[in-house]
Amino acid sequence: MAEDNGSSVQLFDRVARVLVSLPSGSFSDTDPSQNTLIVGSGDDAGDPGLRIVVKITKTSGKDPNTSEVVIYNLAPTTRAKLQAKGVRLVVEAGYRAAGVQRIFVGDARTIDHVREGPDFKTVIKLGDGERSIRYARASQSFAGGSTVAQVVDHCAKAMGLSLGNVGTQLPALGKVLYNGWTAHGAASTELERILRAVNYSYSVQEGQIQILAPGQSIAQAITQLAPDSGLIGSPEMGSPEKIGKPQALKFRALLLAEARPGGRVHLKSDRYDGIFRLRKVSHSFDTRGGDWYTDMEGIADSTVRVA
């Protein structure tokens, strides 16, 4: 479905699984080979695995992306392990022909086991980078002549998450701080504060720090989205986030695992034809039926034809 190679993906035979990372003391332990349970897997043809119902909301803002994951009929021993503090989930989904992709990483906020008729339903509410954002601390003073990049590098590393695109953004953050800078407090707050001073912002996407300038997109292939490649219904123009800001176009597709805030989509519909930079992405699916959807909001990132 990526525009750069003109390939298409068969949008059927869907697969999803959840990796449960047990507490390790790290803010960023998402290696499925380490200290991890794999549940709800339907990787083998003909094996649907456990029923999983997922709702995910991602934005390009500083607040954690959120998800609610419901898993049915986990084994009692697995339910017991989930009660430990510091559990992290990795949600992967996609199509068997192309393989699954990671669409969410989050720290458990709450985990509830509920009896529903003959079934046990485990409801897990999650925040992406939640524990880091709440608990990681930064504490360092920078002398006059230090740069914004030095402060950003310190605060990002203090968060204890994967650094994402931090390294590639640092060369653009060379502004000199002639009066110095003190970073003391929550590492997430200090990172947001120094970036705001130079009109940048950060978010956490799948457990990785993402830093962007206004209007900047992430380094990712532009996805082609049209009625014959997953677009559902007609895109609709929404309201601007703030007065004076551009309006966002809202559109829906069959599950588009690669969609993420800061990414770009080349949308081709009966009315619109152009590239849109995504500011909000929501995924929803149920492995026991129904449609698997991705809802998106995007700002025009190029000249857009409007019929």
Image (cartoon, grey):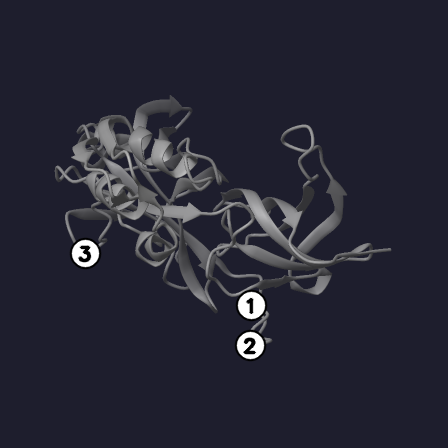
Q: Is residue 73 visible?
A: no
Q: Which residue does the numbered mark 2 point to in the structure image? A: 5
Q: Between residues 219 and 224, which one lies in front from this camera angle?
A: 219
Q: Which residue does the numbered mark 1 point to in the structure image? A: 2
Disc 2, disc 1: CB below 8 Å?
yes
- The quarter of the rendered structure image containing the N terminus is bottom right
Residue type indicated by callout 1: Ala
The answer to whether 64 is drawn above or below residue 149 in the figure is above
Residue found farthest to the left: 25
Q: Position of residue 35 (x, y in %)?
A: 15, 47
Residue type indicated by callout 2: Asn
Distance between mark 2 and mark 1 Cα atoms: 6 Å
Distance between mark 3 and mark 2 Cα atoms: 31 Å
Q: Is residue 203 visible?
A: yes
For label 1, the SS is: loop
Badge 2 local density, few (<14 within 10 Å), some, or many (20+)?
few
Badge 3 local density, few (<14 within 10 Å), some, or many (20+)?
few
Q: Which residue does the numbered mark 3 point to in the structure image? A: 33
Q: Quadrant of residue 274?
A: bottom right
Left or right: 193, with 79 as reference point: right
User: First in sequence: mark 3 or mark 1?
Assistant: 1
Badge 1 local density, few (<14 within 10 Å), some, or many (20+)?
some
Residue type indicated by callout 3: Ser
